[in-house]
Image (spheres, helix red, strand yellow):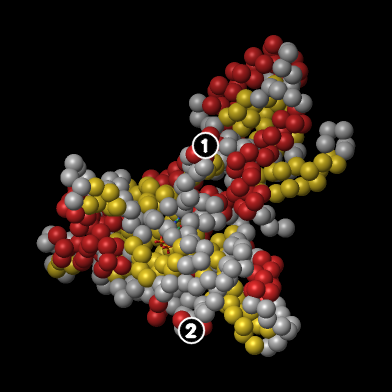
Amino acid sequence: AEVSMETIVALCKRRGFIFQSSEIYGGLNGFFDYGPLGVELKKNIRDCWWNDMVRRREDIVGIESSIIMHPKVWEASGHVAGFTDPLVDCKVSKQRFRADQLFFSPVVIDGKTAGYVSALESENTAAELQAAAETFKRKKALQGALAPVEPRDMTEARPEEIPQIPSPATGEPGSLTPPRAFNMMFETYVGALRDASAVAYLRPETAQGMFVDFKNVVDTGRVKLPFGIAQTGKSFRNEITPRNFIFRSREFEQMEMEYFIHEDADWEKCHKEWIEWCRRWLISIGLPESHLSLYDHPKAKLAFYSRGTTDIMYKYPFGVQELWGIAARGAYDLTQHANASGKPQEIFDEATRKKFVPHVIEPAVGVDRIFLAVLCSAYAEEQVADEKGKAETRTVLRLSPRIAPVKVAVLPLLKNKEHLVARAQELYKKVKRKYTAFYDESGAIGRRYRRQDEIGTPWCVTIDFDTIEKDGTFTLRDRDTMQQKRISEPELFAMLDEQVW
Ligand code: ATP
């Protein structure tokens, strides 16, 4: 069975993965804090990406650009004019919605459409819609048989098709303002003056940093086409309807890479290769291949400069949604910046003795979306036998050892035996120099294993009497199989070295 979002949110809070931001003040919608385990998991995802994308390759270099950049960057990139979502206001509930995420279900009474109920895509259940339709019928004193409501995407509906819209929660009939463009960039002021000349933006993507620093990297590095520039960092979008936990938030972290290629290069081939690289990478950190799919944006809906965009989709509990976008952007961005700044953004081609603006393939992904996908796929509840053979449910996070927040738990069998505790402490400190480790001496050993299962620790090491009295080996217990075997210290480190990369 697929895990529910409620279960994931509850686990995150209970075990310290994610908290609501500013929770003691009631929270702030669209903002989250990562707790002690969450920050480790997130860092591991980012580090794996950085190692595989930058350090282990010869053709990609990293940068870290500032979050606030010259406002002209966002004019040239098109964000000031066009980074908008369609916003509608509900005049009754005073709520704001993204028009393209609103669905309307026709309320059909005796074969005729009597009105509509609205729902936020993937947030309202069929039962809630049905209840709203019934309220609608009662309020309007309509007679006749109510047909089951069928959600219909009304993104392109004509205004007369959405006359009266009771909210699913209250059943109150309402109406929406026509959609209007809402710019999602957060504004701030740089310096002491608070006038138009001081307006700046928190970046809504990290990508522009790579374009604006393109010349600096080319002139100072030893890069030769094709090559990439990558960075990870926070981005900010004033999303109209942040939802689905950390899936869509207002402050999030991106990992982006711009891969520059020759203007005559086979961009389609390169695009395909990057899609496959990203897919393989997601599998390498533990996402199940069965939950991944590709979505090619229809050519007609692409921005004029875009040659093709493919999204890697993930099957979340709330539906199949975009995880990673891989876009072929031609020479658009560099050309825009060349025109706006008056500084050519070209590369010299030795073969043809000509200068040209390289084209680019851009894989752009959100760390928080990977985090959520990873937790949802790793979560399992299983029926197992406890130490006395009694059936119990264990919660286990089957996280890949690559990203698990804690790699090893070191446990002395008994806490009141000084030599067991001393040896366990010694090993714990040694493991901790290189890998995240956790020391736990409280409670029955079975309980301690369960606590580690729930946070995804792949291995537990137990120091027992044989460790001290015999050959120094200890018990290694595997999270997924729950099998135990004896292992020596060098064997433990060899295994960690192989599995955690
Ligand atoms: P969406 O259509 O879901 O709003 P997008 O197509 O606008 O996303 P991009 O601009 O392509 O997203 O951003 C690249 C990646 O950054 C996305 O694939 C996603 O993983 C991540 N991302 C974008 N917006 C958010 C957000 N509000 N919260 C968390 N991650 C986000």
Which residue is rendered at x = 51% and y = 51% of the image? 246
Vertical relation: 302 (above or below) 472: below
**Residue 333 figure quarter:** bottom left
Q: CA distance from mark 2 to mark 1?
A: 45 Å
* Camera sees residue 98: no
Helix, strand or loop under label 2: helix
Q: Name the residue furthest bottom.
A: 111
Vertical relation: 500 (above or below) 130: above
- Mark 2 — residue? 160
Question: What's under tag 2, amino acid-wise?
Answer: Glu
Q: Name the residue furthest right.
A: 389
The one nearer the camera, 138 or 219, is 138
Where is residue 322 drawn, in percent x and y?
50, 63
**Residue 301 figure quarter:** bottom left
**Residue 478 figure quarter:** top right
Is 138 on the left or on the right of 313, as rendered? right
Q: Name the residue furthest top.
A: 418
- Mark 1 — residue? 24
The label shown at residue 388 is: none
Which residue is rendered at x = 48% and y = 76% of the image? 155
The one nearer the camera, 187 or 113, is 113
**Does mark 1 have its CB less than 8 Å from ligand 1?**
no
Is 218 on the left or on the right of 392, as rendered? left
Query: Mark 2 Cα within 10 Å, few/some/many (few <14, many 20+)?
Result: few
Where is residue 312 drawn, in percent x and y?
50, 64
Question: What's under tag 1, amino acid-wise?
Answer: Ile
Is 86 on the left or on the right of 479, as rendered? left
Vertical relation: 82 (above or below) 484: below
For ligand 1, the image quadrant comes to bottom left
Where is residue 365 drawn, in percent x and y?
44, 56
Vertical relation: 284 (above or below) 423: below
